[in-house]
Image (tube, rainbow, N blue to C red):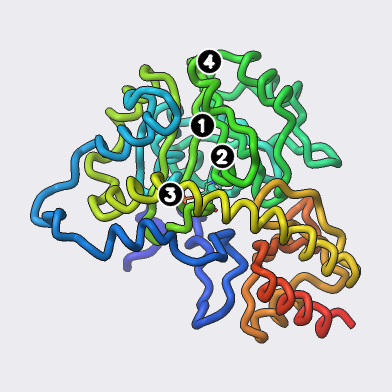
């Protein structure tokens, strides 16, 4: 009988990733761009006459890396691309951590770091954030990791970390420090220029959030040429398909859409926060396109009630330090009004 005893022992306890049935619901659960699909990417995909799907894509995404290099004023050798930044994270674990190696991650943060660490035979070492959801720099440096991974802005708390704290960590160790800037376009501060100075710094980015292209699975990292070279030896060849690469090149050329998206989030975040706070939610400060809020009613009841009203949000209420918390993607005006009205029905 085929059962889990045949599975690799270290992964037998794994469960499938979050995968709700959405059937037309308003998706405020995955922090994608509520303005809809990236227009430049859609335009690029409407004419595929230059694409020959009978051939492999270029092995290491030379076209995308070249436009990224121009965009950031760095060299193509500073970039590695992947099928989403999740793949980049997996490649980083495969490149730098061996069986039993410790990876230091803040807690609470993006749960996939623990998953990739364990998947690659390593040991995730969570270091609790303080009461303001800021980093405990001393404990992170003292935790003796083979790698340190920190998202800023952080998911699911929404805040970014103090630049001085992140710098202290990068400067305070020789091991690779990964700063995950999946929500970097919503925050006007990035560590990307610092890869010139620090050869242990890796910054990951994605086309899934502000760029509104989650379905095409495109991510990349920016780092020293030495690290990029190591990762290139580990990464699966051809992992970024040619349609996604073409769309990403086009999307990078339309920064107006990215600015509009970030401006909309900045305008609408206070509206959602004020609406929720008036209903008794406790909202945490956010530099991203989502907000973490402690619900005045049971988190399961809230998430279920919203689902019945055709709105998906993400439930974190069962996690330590996030008791009764849920996460809302910031919507357009109409979406925010719909969410607040639905929450009002459920909380009154
Ligand atoms: C902090 C963080 N990093 C990385 C990702 C993964 O993004 P991608 O779609 O590029 O794999 C997410 C997605 O939710 C995220 O929240």
What residue is disc 1 on?
203
Q: Residue at x 53, y 64 (%)?
A: 18
- The reply to whether callout 3 and callout 4 are in contact (CB within 8 Å) is no
What residue is disc 4 on?
198
- The reply to whether callout 3 and callout 2 are in contact (CB within 8 Å) is no
Residue 8 visible in this rendered orientation of the protein? no
Q: CA distance from mark 2 to mark 1?
A: 7 Å
Q: CA distance from mark 4 to mark 2?
A: 17 Å
Looking at the image, tell me whether mark 3 or mark 4 is earlier in sequence order.
4
Q: CA distance from mark 3 to mark 1?
A: 22 Å
Looking at the image, tell me whether mark 2 or mark 1 is earlier in sequence order.
2
Q: Position of residue 225 (x, y in %)?
A: 37, 19
Q: Residue at x 84, y 41 (%)?
A: 132
Q: CA distance from mark 3 to mark 4?
A: 30 Å
Q: Nearer the viewer, mark 3 or mark 2?
A: 3
Q: Assign a secondary structure to mark 3.
A: loop
Q: Is residue 201 above or below residue 288?
A: above
| Mark 2 Cα-neighbour bin, 10 Å: few <14, some 14–19, many ≥20 | many
Q: Nearer the viewer, mark 3 or mark 4?
A: 3
Query: Which residue is outermost to the left?
Result: 54
Q: Which circle marks residue 181 in the picture?
A: 2
Q: Assign a secondary structure to mark 2.
A: loop
Looking at the image, tell me whether mark 4 or mark 2 is earlier in sequence order.
2
Q: Position of residue 340 (x, y in %)?
A: 78, 75
Residue 131 visible in this rendered orientation of the protein? yes
What residue is disc 3 on?
254
Quadrant location of the C terminus in the rendered image: bottom right
- The reply to whether callout 4 and callout 1 are in contact (CB within 8 Å) is no
């Amino acid at each position: 009988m085929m059962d889990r005893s045949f599975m690799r022992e270290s992964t037998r306890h794994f469960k499938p990733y979050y995968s709700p049935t959405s059937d037309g619901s308003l998706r405020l659960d995955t922090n994608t761009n509520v303005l809809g699909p990236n227009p430049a990417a859609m335009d690029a995909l409407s004419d595929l006459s230059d694409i020959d799907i009978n051939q492999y894509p270029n092995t290491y995404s030379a076209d995308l890396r070249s436009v990224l290099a121009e965009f950031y004023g760095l060299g193509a050798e500073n970039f590695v691309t992947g099928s989403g930044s999740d793949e980049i994270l997996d490649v980083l674990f495969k490149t730098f951590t061996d069986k039993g190696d410790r990876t230091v991650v803040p807690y609470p943060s993006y749960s996939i770091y623990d998953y990739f660490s364990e998947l690659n035979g390593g040991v995730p070492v969570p270091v609790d954030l303080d009461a303001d959801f800021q980093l405990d720099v001393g404990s992170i440096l003292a935790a003796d990791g083979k790698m340190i991974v920190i998202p800023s802005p952080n998911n699911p708390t929404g805040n970014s970390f103090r630049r001085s704290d992140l710098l202290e960590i990068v400067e305070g160790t020789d091991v690779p420090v990964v700063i995950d800037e999946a929500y970097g376009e919503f925050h006007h501060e990035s560590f990307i220029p610092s890869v010139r100075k620090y050869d242990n710094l890796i910054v990951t980015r994605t086309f899934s959030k502000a760029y509104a292209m989650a379905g095409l699975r495109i991510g990349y990292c920016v780092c020293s040429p030495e690290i990029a070279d190591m990762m290139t030896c580990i990464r699966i060849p051809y992992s970024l398909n040619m349609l996604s690469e073409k769309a990403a090149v086009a999307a990078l050329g339309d920064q107006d859409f990215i600015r509009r998206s970030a401006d909309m989030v900045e305008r609408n975040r206070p509206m959602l926060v004020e609406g929720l706070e008036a209903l008794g939610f406790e909202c945490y400060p956010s530099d991203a396109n989502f907000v973490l809020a402690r619900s005045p009613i049971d988190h399961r009841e809230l998430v279920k009630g919203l689902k019945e009203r055709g709105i998906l949000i993400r439930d974190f209420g069962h996690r330590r330090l996030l008791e009764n918390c849920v996460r809302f993607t910031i919507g357009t005006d109409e979406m925010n009004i719909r969410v607040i009205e639905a929450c009002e029905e459920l909380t009154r």
